[in-house]
Amino acid sequence: MPSTTDNRFTSPALARALKLAALFAVVKLLLQFALTLWTEHLGYSYFRDEFYYIACGHHLAWGYVDHGPIVALQARLGEILFGDSVFGIRVLSAFAGALTVFLGGILCWSLGGRRPAQALTCIGLIVTPQYIGVDGFLSMNSFEAVFWSGCLLALIMVARGASPALWWAFFGICAGVGLLNKPSMAFFLIAAGIGLLVTPQRRLLASRWTALGIALLLLIALPNLLWQIHNHWPTAEFLHNGRVEGKNLVLNPLEFFLAQFSNMHPLNALLWITGVVALLRGKSIRNTRWLGFTFVAFFIIMYISHAKDYYLQGIYPAFFAAGAIAWEHRRAASTRVQRDRIFAFPVYESLLLLTGLVILPMSSPVLRPSAWVRYTAALHLRAKPTESGGSGPLPQFFADRFGWDQQYSVVSGAFHALSASDQRRVCIFGKDYGEAGNIDFRNHLFHDTLPPAISGQNSYWTWGTHDCDPNLVIAIIPDTQAAVGTKYASVTLLGHNSDPYSMPFERRNIYLLRDRKPGAPFRWADERFYY
């Protein structure tokens, strides 16, 4: 690692890096805003998980069954600050994407990269399909790369000789909040620890400031741990159920590796693979082998834990930066052209942008559904599933934005057709959190008078039944009328979601159920479904 006296690390150099990174961050922000507005114009609505996160935002707590508290806070703040429109609830995710690009540029600077490498890093991050996707909707994944990049920046700065008190404190904050955002942060921290321990940089851990950083992260994450203990480890049950039921598709090592190419943009492999190799070799970027080992360790941990292939997304900005620096050094050794020209790789950067446009419909629904089907068929592009179960003509990431209006219309119509006394006691039951969340969200959006929806899935189960009467239920469920008839004396089919672009498993029947049979008593504990 270059010393802090190197002119690349002077205040003027940092100021230029900050300006350049900020410029590309603004470009990223405007891109995400434009994509959200355009896709909404095309008819793509709220994504299924967004309903759930918004519901969690109305039940703020230190923990939830299947995610940390940060995304619930993100949802609530988004609603308060920007409104509950499709655009409004996604603003903070777009800002997270901009922060990821900004940190990518600063990580490049911290590793010794000049402006050409910094620009190449930012361009690579902007065109990355995985980031375009997660930064385009309300999601915990949008902030993941921010927290992880913050941790790596802190470690790099400590290794450079910068203030250990400041940067270990920064590390502790990023790591602690990152743990509140998503449990996978723990695996990242383990990988970083392995990377440091197997290299001479292990000396960085022998400091009182290291203890301060670790204490800080534990203190920040402690409320969630206490919540887990108090609620009998629901997240552990959720993860166990997912493994037992085969929720995630299990890939072999080659498939898991190749999935990174499509996730991060095929041409970006020239950045991150080059970056990992350069760091492990330790020649063009010295004293950073620990960072290369961090990637290797994390990749192995994620694979053996059968994680979804995109769970690696948070770690990549630093390796884009390292790859850009390696190419910058190679270019400097072979040409006398001014090294500090911003766009020093015009052919490669142009190819990144052009191919990024070609594959953009795979990460953001910029085409109408029918046009998307024709386009992907013509180019032989195929969206890969990450979970078991079938899909319709659209991948789940797009399909889960259809059918919600129709579903709510049927439920709302059935509710208002009830007598006043029945309206006060009726249960509105959704088989999963998407259906329940949709009812709750649109009930609030339209200032309707429906009671809170209930569901047995994940955190919805923890919120209970709100004292509704199980002898009168409007139910959105996959069961046949005959099957429901074994539990209720009166079963009326009200309708079903028939949108051809929605997920097949969401095309469920909507029933009005009356009078639970004595032989099938209702127990809320039996409805718990952590999956």
Image (cartoon, rainbow, N blue to C red):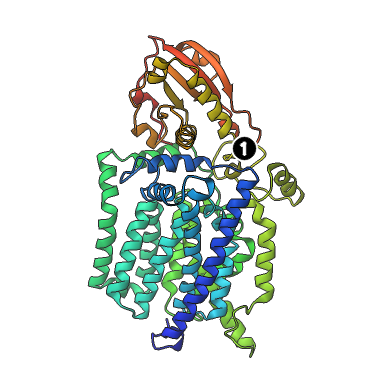
Q: Position of residue 427 (x, y in %)?
A: 41, 22
Is 89 in front, or is 245?
A: 89
Image quarter in which the N terminus is found: bottom left
Q: Position of residue 311 (x, y in %)?
A: 48, 53
- Dot 1: what SS? loop
Residue type, label 1: Ser
Left or right: 380, with 457 as reference point: right
* Whether residue 92 is situated above or below residue 368 in the rendered picture: below
Residue found at the far bottom of this picture: 336
Residue at the spot of label 1: 391
Image quarter in which the C terminus is found: top left
Residue 365 in sight: yes
Q: At 40% across and 13% down in the image, what residue appears? A: 520
Q: Position of residue 457 (x, y in %)?
A: 42, 33
Left or right: 354, with 432 as reference point: right
Q: At 62% across and 78% down in the image, what residue appears? A: 343
Total numbered labels placed on residues in the image:
1
Residues packed near mark 1 inside 10 Å, few (<14), some (14 to 19) or many (20 plus): some
Is 446 in front, or is 323?
A: 446
* Whether residue 406 is situated above or below residue 154 in the rendered picture: above
Is 33 in front, or is 115?
A: 33
Left or right: 475, with 342 as reference point: left
Q: At 60% across and 40% down in the image, what residue appears? A: 399
Q: At 34% across and 57% down in the image, what residue appears? A: 177
Q: Position of residue 249 (x, y in %)?
A: 54, 43
Residue 200 in sight: no
* Whether residue 31 is situated above or below residue 469 in the rendered picture: below
